[in-house]
Amino acid sequence: MSRALACRSVPPFLRLRSTVFDDGHWMGRLDHKDWLAPNEVLKIFASIRDAGLITSVFKKACARRDYKPSEALYSLMIDRLAGARRFDDVEELLARARVEKFRFSDEFFYRLIKMYGNVANHPEKAMETLYAMPGYNCWPSTKTFNYVLHMLVCKRQYEVVHEVYASAPRLGVALDTCCFNILVKGLCQFGKFDEAISLLDEMPKQECLPNAKTYSTLMHFLCQKGRVDEAFELFERMRKEEIEADTVVYNILISGLCREGRVAVAFDQFKSMSSEGCHPNSGTYQVLLDGLVASRMFVEAKGLLGMMSAEGLRPSFSSYKLLIDGLCTVDCLDDAHHVLKQMVDHGFVPRMAVCKRGKDSYKTAQAYCDLVIETPPTTCSSSLPPFSHRGQLGRVPISRCPQIAGEVCPSISGRADLLVRFAGRRRTRGS
């Protein structure tokens, strides 16, 4: 065990730290007249436990003749100070770097902006840092610029998103499709769909072309607002521009149609996917299955369930429950029996109230008890999962079988003859 721990790799940051000496020892190292290598200086700052001492130790290091600023040192100090939420000290270090005319890399500012946005929760400071980058002889990359845009959209700072977008020429940033996708998302969240759609015409002027992500973002928000027909207009525009629709696009359209109750049209769209060279995934099946169940098309839903099994996919527990419940409602008890067994084969644990409806739910209760009977003693290692009863997993005793049948299907709970037959079946198989 100890050998395995010794061989395990240690992060570079932890390799620099030492827990043997206190902070006074490491600060005293800077009073020595011996020349300190850059790695030794990094070790000193990494080993100081009290982040409040970082700035004073840095001033002492600056007074040494062998002091040589480095990006690695600044990064280490800022990481330590940000972790202690000492952002004023971070500003003091950056002011020192500006006086020294130190030139940072774009990656340094990218991490600094992420620190302001994520750790400090100060998007305004992140924007200021982006604008200040040329003052450090560093021009922002498209990656850094897009991160600021994305951060502002995620924090719903829509009023200043356009301001940052308009600063791209001044900062020397070349806009790309990702940038416009972020703008489209922000405008849609802000409810400005017309302006978002107009960006499709603006992108070619900036030597950018929309992609499937651009269109899927627009379609998603349009479908959320019930504007499914407009989403299909964009879908036709995609085809004219020879942009291949991916599975996400189809899932959004199918979900929008199902939400409006147009399940038949959604099913046609589902069947056309493969002919277009786009294969459905588990999300496609799940959305359509939920739509069929919600529209009480239980027989069609059972057929889709078989298609999912053929593809090696499985629905959610709630879909199984609603489908079994619906099949019992329309007295398709044999189908409900089949779906219940398939549910167990897929690793789900049927609960006692998985079926509560139907004029005569005897077969469904019988199916459940059959599954309980067929479960081998070592349920945890078998292909069938243990059964759940009121939050407890495990095999169900023989004496509980009549009560189980009544709980699964309350409609037979008062019929003693059926319950006795269940108990008799259980004793016969158990012997």
Image (cartoon, rainbow, N blue to C red):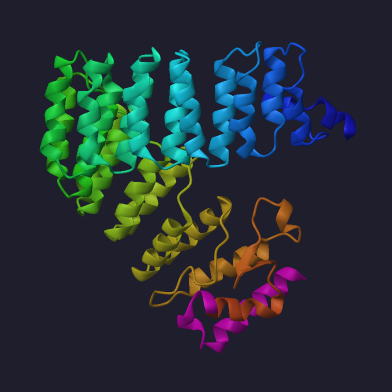
Whether residue 140 is situated above or below residue 5 in the rendered picture: above
Instruction: Depth check: give the residue in front, 129 or 11.
Output: 129
Residue 407 is left or right of residue 134, and the answer is right
Looking at the image, which residue is at 42% across and 49% down?
305
For the C terminus, the quadrant is bottom right
- Where is residue 12 shown, x and y percent of the image? 69, 23
Secondary structure, magenta segment, majority class:
helix
Res 36 → quadrant: top right
Instruction: Depth check: give the residue in front, 399 or 93.
Output: 93
Residue 189 is left or right of residue 281, and the answer is left
Looking at the image, which residue is at 58% across and 19% down?
72
What segment is highlighted magenta in the picture? Answer: 407-431
Instruction: Depth check: give the residue in front, 19 or 340.
Output: 19
Looking at the image, which residue is at 21% across and 54% down?
261
- Where is residue 34 shown, x and y percent of the image? 77, 12
Residue 321 is left or right of residue 1, and the answer is left
Residue 188 showing in the rendered view = yes
